[in-house]
Amino acid sequence: MLVGIFPDADALADEAARRVIRTLDAETSPTLGVATGSTPRPLYARLRAAHAAGQFSLEDVPTYALDEYVGLSPAQPQSYRHELLDQLTGPAGTGLREENLHTPHALADDPWREAQRYDALVGGAHVTIQILGIGENGHVGFNEPGGSLASRSHVSALTESTRHANARFFDDDVSAVPELSITQGLSTIALAECLILLATGTAKARAIRELVEGPVSAHWPATALQWHQDLVVLVDEDAASELEFAHDLREQWAAARHRH
Ligand code: PGA
């Protein structure tokens, strides 16, 4: 694991965009894993700007979402498919074509079967780089505390903490937040060649401390990713504020810059 600590969200997004573009450029047939939530939006803005400048395109890049709410139609703005289409496709987008954006089918008759189908799809895709956020409770995708650290894609019940955190996308109405999601499992996520996890703000500081320095534990699902061989964690100073080893991590980051 390599941890980069940045003065603010803009500097972090610049570095994330640089890494995503460079990693995809280095592959002949790249595939991309994308996350939703507010944290990756500045990164997506930079990918759109790079596309507008003719420096980058997702035109031929199959792209896979981490998760989706069960029961929300893609026409609803809170649906992750809707959000990703908004962020990545269209004339001012990244070149991504709608048919190349894969998301779990939120309206499938049998969400459990759909989770299996999606798992096989992502498992066969050899994702080049997976963009990740992290929940205040340490979730990644909708892998909530107490779940298996070795899970494959599955139907997951959102915790109360997550439903409260996400209520801001539903006019602050917690009761409107779906109770179930289909999420890539932690083992499925770990199949990606590179993982890049972004976190900003003090609300994420505890989760980042556990991810970076804590024991691997179902209390903090993201800690399962400590075993991944190419995990880059990019945080701002606020999200880094509880790290005990911040000084050492900065030195490791500086040393790694000579390689990258
Ligand atoms: P956020 O969500 O980027 O909106 O904070 C992250 C997550 O819950 O995984």
Image (cartoon, rainbow, N blue to C red):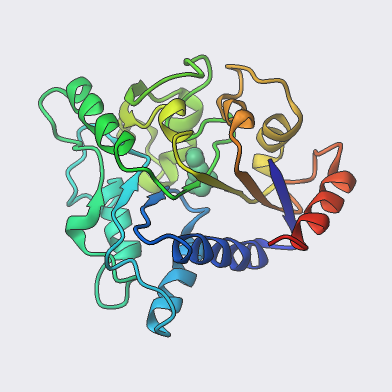
Q: Toward the viewer: 26 or 169?
A: 26
Q: Nearer the viewer, residue 158 or 147?
A: 147
Is residue 259 found left or right of 55 in the rendered image? right
Q: Nearer the viewer, residue 212 or 166?
A: 212
Relative vertical location of residue 195 with respect to residue 154 in this rendering, above or below: below
Query: Seen from this angle, which residue lies furthest bottom?
Result: 53
In the image, residue 71 lies at what x, y percent? 20, 33
Residue 150 on image: x %, y %: 47, 18
Please identify the residue farthest to the left as the structure is shown: 109
- Residue 171 visible from this viewpoint: no
Looking at the image, residue 215 lies above or below residue 80 = above
Residue 237 screen position, x and y as percent? 76, 53
Instruction: Give the mark count.
Output: 0
Residue 220, image quadrant: top right
Give the quadrant of the N terminus: top right
| Image quadrant in which the C terminus is located | bottom right
Q: Is 119 left or right of 190, judged from the image as shown?
A: left
Horizontal and vertical percent for residue 222?
57, 30
**Can you tell which quarter of the image residue 9 is in?**
bottom right
Q: Residue furthest front?
A: 28
Tell me which residue sits at (36%, 53%) in the image.
31
Nearer to me, 191 or 80 = 191
Q: Is residue 170 visible?
A: yes
Picture layout, residue 156 above or below residue 200: above
Specify whether 49 is left or right of 245: left
Residue at x 52% of width, y 14% of height: 146
Q: Residue at x 45, y 23 (%)?
A: 159
